[in-house]
Image: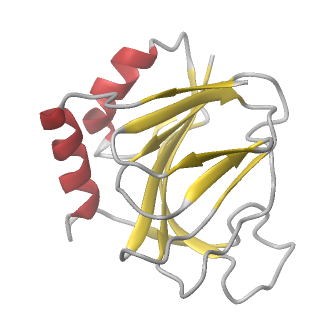
Amino acid sequence: MFKVINNFLTKDEHETLKNMLESPMFPWFFAKGKVNPTDKPDLFDYQFVHIFYKDNFINSNFFDYLDPIIKKLKPLSLIRVKANLNPITNKLIKSEKHIDSDFECKAAIYYVNDNDGYTMIENKKVKSESNKIVLFNSQQKHHGTTSTNCNNRMVINFNYF
């Protein structure tokens, strides 16, 4: 099971976070492969990422922008926080089904912008709607998609205890 919360942040908190991610000063990094970087040489199997937190280390000067989300999630400990940007495609392209970690923990996907993409968790579709968050177990198989009706699909993934 999973839980969806609409309007997770205040309008101002959400706009501040969205504007930061859309800023030309925000560093996005090319990642070949959305799930398994070396497994699939598919032309469209890529995304841009920004690792905010990994391996007990803050990896980003922009980490503090996540405070409103982290305060509401109330994690005991963060494992990984990563933003994904998937550029527009002519048709929706699904990523591979996957789990977020080799061990059980909590997972959350925060949707930054409105688009026609979605996340499929088990057999249920969660639409990409701005300022929405979905909470689920990191062991639940899921996959995301690209979008066809805006420049990109942006989400922030949280794995935590």
Residue 110 coordinates in the image, percent (x, y):
45, 40
Q: Is residue 32 left or right of residue 140?
A: left
Is 118 on the left-hand or right-hand side of 83?
right
Viewport quadrant of the C terminus: top right
Residue ID at (33%, 40%): 131
Where is residue 154 shown, x and y percent of the image?
A: 43, 58
The residue lying at 79 percent from left, 64 percent from top is 36
Q: Residue at x 25, y 51 (%)?
A: 18
Q: Nearer the viewer, residue 59 or 13?
A: 13
**Residue 95 drawn above or below residue 121:** below
Is residue 67 found left or right of 3 in the rendered image?
A: left
- The number of callouts visible is 0
Can residue 51 be seen in the rendering of this structure?
Answer: no
Q: Between residue 71 and residue 147, name the one nearer to us.
A: 147
Q: Looking at the image, what colour scheme do you see?
A: secondary structure
- Quadrant housing residue 8: top left
Where 60 falls versus 145 (above or below)?
A: above
Q: Is 86 drawn above or below residue 35 in the view shown? A: below
> In the rendered image, is residue 27 in sight?
yes
Q: Quadrant of the N terminus?
A: top right
Q: Foreground residue, 148 or 41? A: 148
Residue 82 image position (x, y, % from top left): 51, 47
**Residue at point 72%, 65% (across, down):** 95
- Asked whether, in this view, residue 42 is left or right of residue 57, the answer is right
